[in-house]
Image: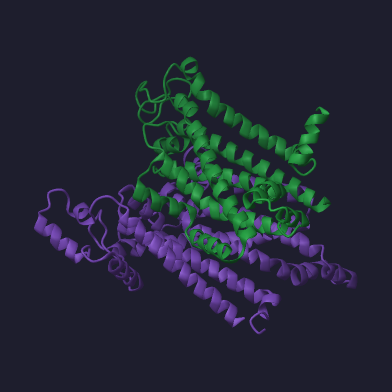
Amino acid sequence: MTTIDTATETIAAPPGLLRRIIRQRQARIGLAFTGIIVLVAVVGPLLLPWLTGYTSTEFTGRPFQPDGVFGTDNLGRDILSRFLDGGLTLLVFAALATALGMLLGTAAGMLAAYQGGKLDSIIMRGNDVLLALPQLVFALLAITVLGPQGWVVVLVIGITHAPRIARVTRSAASAVITEDFIRASEMYAVPRWKILLKDVLPNITGPLMVELGLRMTYSIAAIASLSFLGLGMQPPTADWGLMINENRIALTLQPWGVILPVLAIAILTVGSNLITDAVARASATVEESK
Amino acid sequence: MPGLILRRLAISAVILLVVSMLVFVATLLLPGDPAQAILGQQATPERLEALREQMNLNDPFAQRYLHWLGGLFVGDFGVSAASGGSVAALLGDRIAASLVLMVAAATISIPVGILVGSYSALRRGKAGDHAATGISLVLAALPDFVIGIALVTLFSTTVFTVLPSVTMAPPGEQVWDYPSQLILPVLTLVLVVMPYIIRMMRTTMIEVLDSGYVEMARLKGVPERQVIWRHALPHAIAPVAQVVAIQLAWLAGGIVVVEFLFRYPGVGQALVDAVTNRDVQVVQALAMLIAAVYVVVNLFADIVGIVTNPKLRTGGIR
């Protein structure tokens, strides 16, 4: 690593946070796990024409037959093709939902902490109301009204993440805003948004990164669950959650249609949870050594 | 302290009221006419008008909301658009069936979680602790349906075929008459809920074991068994109560996926069916029911927190 790289790193994050994360064995395992699945999901759709010769919605034979590598699904489509094609939407939707939640939650949390007073209590009481409905029930309510569409799922999962992220951001930010350098910026009449973005945000990256990992894991689980219930991605789209729903009636006959997507989702969520846990430990040790 | 609890109670009531508004407004966003949905396309205008009158659809919005809210208190949840029957009749047995599932999962996961967490803390850094923390880290990451399907493949279809994977009680009989059908759904819920209890119990127990009074007790020569049961465990359990309550509240929403997976005739399955059929009255009633359970359990957790925390106990007197 060059000296320039380390120099920028010390400015961007608490010293050695990334290295503390990578040094942990479980972080490396987690990275390998998520890496494999992300690779399958991203490269899979590109490899389809060469690898199996079928598209993910093409009928190749009779249902639940052992044709091809992993057999056919409930409508006689090639399971391997559908598996390779079914991960990308899940990943993209989960990433979008997490990004939306982080954006809304961080903004609301920082504003609540910095502004205090009336705005603070409005934001936090709004949070309490959103938190009174379990995430899945909130999503189901929205889907009843707006229909099972991709943007509805992303929007509702993002919005239900926001209050949980806002709470963490608020408590982390309220410890920072009493510091002297914030006073100094205020004295120089730095605009409020610039203080939040340049002074507060860089000092709460630790808890936010933990939250990012946690919410990503939950987004994947929530979106896959909705598809599994038949209320997320709609047929004939190839999707891991939906595949499990479609093929679980023939678990004894043709288990691959269920086992492949279940394994993929399991490896993905365990991997991202391992990374999150490592980040949490790393940022906790940074806090202690301060 | 009573003042603090009363305040918390009032906040919960307000939250539930706002949630009920949210849930009710959701129906207004729906395209189409509920009366038309029940009677179908062939209905005559007269019959439509009669049903609209009967369902109070012609009243102003605020009045309809109050009528609906009043109905919730006396157990009148409206009429299901899909079946035409009353929502309350549809849900009666299902609420009991879901409660069986939740109570069974809670009574197994709480004591076992506390025991495994304490064991893990006592054997800190040894093989047993590593196994317990590793397994709970993996289980905490897995979505509930993944755990459920893994159990189904293991115990009922592919590896062993010892347990039923779907719940099928003949009409008129209750699900708890067939205990073997309850094993897999309950086990799934237990495995979803327990990791969080284990992890929290381990953390607080380690903290307590490192504290001054435990060291003092040991130095006095109190037997180790008594140190753990009399000095450490009671102090570690208070913070865990909060996590337990959060997990119990989670169960209210988490049963949805598990019931769907095992075709368990409970509230969750009814909710998924209602969403699929876009049966708004049923979705509304169930969303309110689940939100109420959620809020009440959280309220209970906060009250436990207030009662067990000496700092807050005196807060109301000042």
Q: Quadrant of the N terminus of chain A?
A: top right
Q: Colour of chain B?
A: purple
Q: Residue at x 71, y 44 (%)?
A: A279
- Residue at the extreme bottom: B317
Q: Residue at x 52, y 24 (%)?
A: A44
Please give left or right for residue A237 compared with residue B63 in the image: right
Q: Nearer the viewer, residue B124 or A126?
A: A126
Give residue A234's position: percent from left, percent from top. Answer: 38, 37
Q: Nearer the viewer, residue B33 or B306?
A: B33
Please give left or right for residue A275 compared with residue A284 in the image: left
Give residue A105's position: percent from left, percent from top. Answer: 57, 51
Please give left or right for residue B39 compared with residue B69 in the image: left
Colour basis: by chain
Q: Colour of chain A?
A: green
Instruction: State the image quarter where residue A172 is shown.
Output: bottom right
- Residue at the extreme front: A188
Q: Nearer the viewer, residue A206 or B150?
A: A206
Q: Is residue A265 above or below residue B2?
A: above
Q: Is residue A228 above or below residue B117?
A: above
Q: Is residue B134 visible?
A: no
Please give left or right for residue B74 compared with residue B98 in the image: left
Give residue B120's position: percent from left, percent from top. Answer: 73, 55
Q: Nearer the viewer, residue A249 or A7?
A: A7
Give residue B300's position: percent from left, percent from top. Answer: 55, 71
Q: Residue at x 51, y 71 (%)?
A: B11
Instruction: State the image quarter where residue B196 is shown.
Output: bottom right
Q: Residue at x 62, y 81 (%)?
A: B1
Q: Is residue B62 visible?
A: yes
Q: Is residue A195 above or below residue A232?
A: below
